[in-house]
Image (cartoon, rainbow, N blue to C red):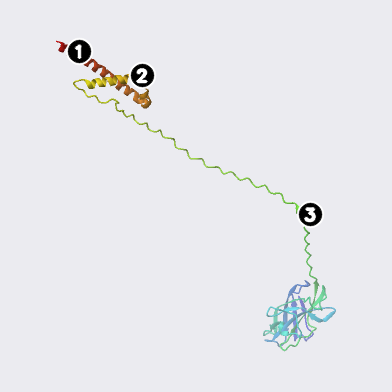
Amino acid sequence: MLLFKSSTPASAVTYTISGVPSNIEEGQSISVTVNLTVAGSAGKSYYLRAAFSHPDTLTSYFGYTKNHSDNWYNGTPSPIDYTQYKRVTMNEFNTWSGVAETKLDTSSSTYKGSGTYNLKLRYYTESGNLSDESSNSVQIAVTATASPSPSPSPSPSPSPSPDSIGASPSPSPSPSPTPIPSPDPPPSPSPRPSPKPSPKPSPSPLKTLETTESGEVLSTATQAAEDEKDNESSSGGTFFLANISTEKVLPIGLIGGGLIFIGISAASFLKGKHSDTIDDQND
């Protein structure tokens, strides 16, 4: 801890400074712990100013001080508004202890770049009077802030050759469509066999014969049966076979044979009876 005293009598003003770094960068802000004692100052307000000076120009001060409103003030524009510096109020023991924050003003014409600078702490009274200039001071080494390295410029993209400009791009092969499997067709229903119609008995082509006493009808029926038999034998049954199905041939044949048998029997019977009648008439 460094202790500096003003040229004012020791009983009047005392400055105690601590926490001052020996090296800073030109854009860096620093916080300094201050203990200020002023005789007979209980309850009074003062305005603290932290100022930098170069060894070649010790009376030219510059720099920023953060005030009680948390704003930075560098004493411009002129004239100086001392109330914009950091305001402190002395306690009943005529002292104030706290932190003062400051930084270099690199835009000032007094700033000479990296090197050694003096930091001095001063104060203004409520009426605007400045304390003794030969008060406390400490040296700080300032280094220039390293400038950021330039970012590499992007490499220029190669320009297309005239041949590549005129050439049309090769068409990309279109993907073959994926075949979609067709669903299996539903099974077709099996054909049902058509029911065969039951054969109906055909009516007899022969008329119903009526029996008479004279035997004429029987003779006619017998003659018709014989004629039918002759027709069947001559034509080979073509008419009936052509129009009658196979299932009907057998019944019709049986019926025809029966009729022929009946006709022959009736003819024999009538012939025998006719002979008996003639014999009776002769007797």
The structure residue drawn at horizontal position 71% and vertical position 84%, both measured from the top left corner, is 83
Residue at label 3? 162
Above or below — where is 242 with respect to 29? above
Image coordinates for residue 218, horizontal then vertical, percent: 23, 21
Q: Earlier in the sequence, mark 3 or mark 1?
A: 3
| Marks 3,1: beta carbons within 8 A | no
Residue 275 - label: 1
Name the residue tied to disc 2: 234
Image quarter of residue 99: bottom right
Q: Toward the viewer: 40 or 160? A: 160
Q: CA distance from mark 1 to mark 2?
A: 33 Å
Q: Residue at image x 29%, y 20%? A: 225
Image point 36% across, 27% down: which residue?
Answer: 243
Work out whether residue 258 can be spotted: no
**Quarter that holds the N terminus:** bottom right
Q: Is residue 106 left or right of residue 67?
A: right
Does the image show residue 274? yes
